């Protein structure tokens, strides 16, 4: 059987060089190409698998002090986040809440005090079928679909959307 899919940003750009892992009876991995596409050929049909994209680099990609201001406004109730995707991105330390600790983690990254945030990855991939990413909803207490269970079939197509651990502007 063939398993293929794509990794996209919220605005539809492909995510290149993400590691895509399949685990089950057998384990495989591949990397997404410049269009964000990936493919696994000749996978045993009679097995079930879990598919999970992973990318943990470039923490400062697009991050600026403007992002800190947006998180502060959200915390203070001045300007709440309008999409589930912003809640996911704003939870920099992946604690399940958005607090001053997230702001502190961003400051440390921007100032070069640290190069990553423990307990989180710089990029998170959510299954495109998750309904709340673009709605005004706080999904932080949901079990976010960051992997997909693949059943026995001939051809499987998967799409994930990537979210930066904080970036308030449109992601490219």
Image: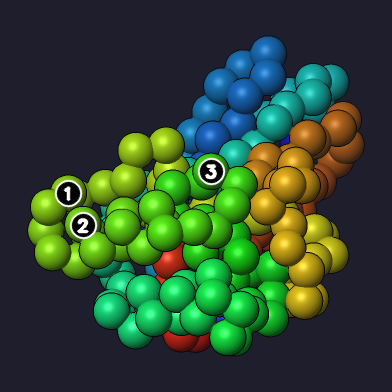
- The residue that label 2 is drawn on is 108
Q: Which residue is mark 3?
A: 95
The residue located at (68%, 19%) in the rendering is 24
- Report how many numbered discs are placed on residues in the image: 3
Give x and y (percent) for residue 50.
70, 31
Q: Where does residue 139 sit, x and y in percent of width and height? A: 73, 57
Give the side of residue 41 with respect to residue 95, left or right. Answer: right
Q: In which quadrant will I find the N terminus?
A: top right
Query: Is residue 103 visible to the viewer in this orientation of the structure?
Result: yes
**Marks 1/3: CA–CA distance:** 18 Å
Q: Nearer the viewer, residue 80 or 60?
A: 80
Q: Of marks 2 and 3, which one's residue comes earlier in the chain? A: 3
Does the rendering let one see residue 8?
no
Tell me the element at label 1: loop
Identify the residue at image location x=39%, y=53%. 101
Circle 1 is placed at which residue position?
114
Q: Residue furthest front?
A: 76
Q: Kindly indicate whether the residue at mark 3 contacts the one at mark 2 (C-beta within 8 angstroms).
A: no
């Amino acid at each position: 059987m063939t398993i293929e899919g794509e990794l996209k940003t919220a605005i539809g750009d492909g995510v290149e060089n993400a590691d895509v892992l399949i685990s089950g009876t057998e384990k495989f991995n591949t990397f997404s190409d410049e269009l964000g596409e990936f493919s696994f050929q000749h996978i045993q049909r009679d097995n079930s698998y879990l598919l999970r994209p992973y990318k943990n680099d470039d923490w400062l990609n697009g991050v600026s002090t403007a992002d800190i201001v947006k998180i502060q406004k959200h915390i203070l109730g001045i300007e709440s986040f309008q999409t589930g995707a912003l809640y996911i991105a704003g939870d920099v330390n992946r604690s399940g809440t958005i607090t001053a600790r997230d702001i502190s983690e961003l400051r440390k990254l921007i100032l070069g005090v640290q190069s990553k945030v423990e307990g989180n990855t710089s990029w998170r991939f959510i299954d495109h079928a998750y309904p709340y990413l673009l709605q005004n909803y706080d999904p932080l207490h949901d079990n976010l679909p960051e992997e997909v269970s693949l059943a026995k079939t001939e051809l499987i197509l998967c799409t994930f959307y990537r979210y930066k651990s904080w970036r308030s502007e449109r992601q490219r």
